[in-house]
Image (tube, rainbow, N blue to C red):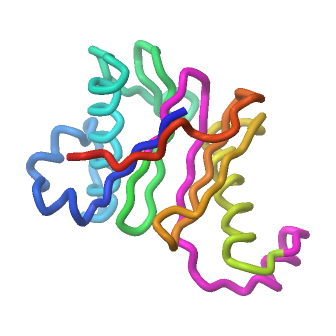
Amino acid sequence: MEIYYINTDEFLKTHDTEFLRKYTDGKEFKSLKRFTQFTIGRYLVKTAAKNFYSMADTEIIIENDKPKFKNGGMFFSISHSANFVAAAFDVLECGLDIEEMKPRDFEALSKRYNKNFKTAEDFYKFWTAYEAEIKLQQKGQSVFSCVFQDRFMLSAVSVNPVFSKPSCISRFDV
């Protein structure tokens, strides 16, 4: 598994909304923020698929509420939080979630989820793995979590039982 990310603030310094329109996949958006997150995510997936995995056809379809390449070849999962959009790629199904770690009532969250969250890292490691499994649409056979850019938690899950960590987490140069 490989994970690539884009800092949207940096990306928008060199790309405008007109450039991003070709990545809407025909969708309409209620807000500029949602438009930006969606289209940068699609740009990241389609461009990485072409550049790193030599995929000629990067058409994306939705199957069982999950985006996938129409002609297969590679699985991906997209997530965004604050000013980051990230995508995981693997030859097996995967799920990815990234969340900005914010102060929370860990005592209340511990009671709600029957866990013992003492820190933001404890809670967000649980939460991002949970969200990544929702994207995977099944219980992951393996989970990788890490603090990303000092204030985010990133978790990737895979159906691969021997997956331990991504081979890379790389900034996607735009």
Residue 159 drawn in magenta:
no
Q: Which residue lies at the image location 90% right of the left edge and 69% below the top edge?
A: 114
- Which of the 4 image quadrants contains residue 33? bottom left
Q: Quadrant of the N terminus?
A: top right
Residue 118 as seen in the image, left or right of residue 41:
right
Residue 101 drawn in magenta:
yes
Q: Which residue lies at the image location 13% right of the left edge and 55% below the top edge?
A: 17
Residue 122 as seen in the image, left or right of residue 34:
right
The image position of residue 11, as x and y in percent, is 21, 57
- Which of the 4 image quadrants contains residue 122? bottom right
Q: Which residue lies at the image location 43% right of the left edge and 49% below the top edge?
A: 86
Q: Is residue 34 above or below residue 49?
A: below
What range is drawn magenta here?
Answer: 87-116
Q: Is residue 52 above or below residue 174?
A: above
- How many numbered marks have been drawn onto this rendered protein structure? 0
The image position of residue 31, as x and y in percent, is 29, 64
Q: In the displayed orientation, state which residue is furthest to the front.
A: 167
The image position of residue 73, as x and y in percent, is 46, 15
Q: Which residue lies at the image location 51% right of the left edge and 26% below the top edge?
A: 75
Q: Is residue 98 above or below residue 62?
A: below
The image position of residue 135, as x and y in percent, is 60, 42
Residue 140 as seen in the image, left or right of residue 38:
right
